[in-house]
Image (cartoon, grey):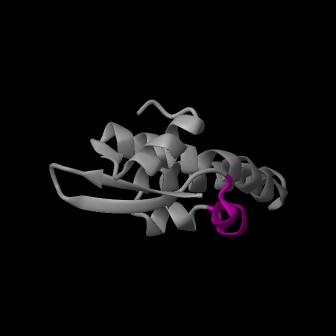
Amino acid sequence: MFVTLTNRATAAVVTTKVGFSWTTLFFGFFPALFRSDYKWALIIIAIELLTGTFTFGGGTFFTCLVFSFLYNRLYINDLLAKGYEPANETARDILRANNFAV
């Protein structure tokens, strides 16, 4: 399920997925990096490095698994905090159904 968010101040439009992030599960911090979400990219890579170092790489999968459930919610919350709004009523309804403060 995807939602489109718009920022009236900058006229930027972002379409993002709500829910589980398969790309984060398989590619770790790269989806955050490609979305220019540098804060979460650095946080994810730091945690991957910490857990992977002490578990010979096994902790990296666990970190990716945890963030695959969390990352899209974190990304949407950051966009909403930056002034993005749902582009239409359908997007607003989807966000409300997933417990976002819209």
Coordinates of residue 18 in the picture (x, y in percent): 57, 52
Question: Looking at the image, which residue is at 73% across and 47% down?
Answer: 66
Residue ID at (44%, 43%)? 92
Which residue is located at x 41 percent, y 42 percent?
78
The one of 14 and 48 positioned closer to us in this rendering = 14
Is residue 98 shown left or right of residue 9? Answer: right
Position in image of residue 59 (x %, y %): 80, 53
Vertical arrangement, residue 81 with respect to residue 27, above or below: above
Instruction: State which quarter of the image contains the N terminus.
Output: bottom right
| Quarter occupied by residue 6 | bottom left
Residue 14 magenta: no
Does the magenta stretch mainly form a helix, a strand or a loop? helix
Residue positioned most to the left: 9
Q: Viewer-proximal residue, 72 or 56?
A: 72
**Residue 8 in the figure: left or right of residue 73:** left
Q: Residue 94: x percent and y percent?
A: 53, 45
Q: Is residue 66 left or right of residue 76?
A: right
Q: Position of residue 52 (x, y in %)?
A: 75, 56
**Residue at the spot x=66%, y=55% of the render?**
49
Q: Is residue 16 in view?
A: yes
Total residue callouts = 0
What span is colored magenta in the figure? 20-28
Nearest the eye: 77 or 26: 77
Nearer to the camera, 6 or 41: 6
**Residue 25 among those drawn in magenta:** yes
* Residue 30, above or below 52: below
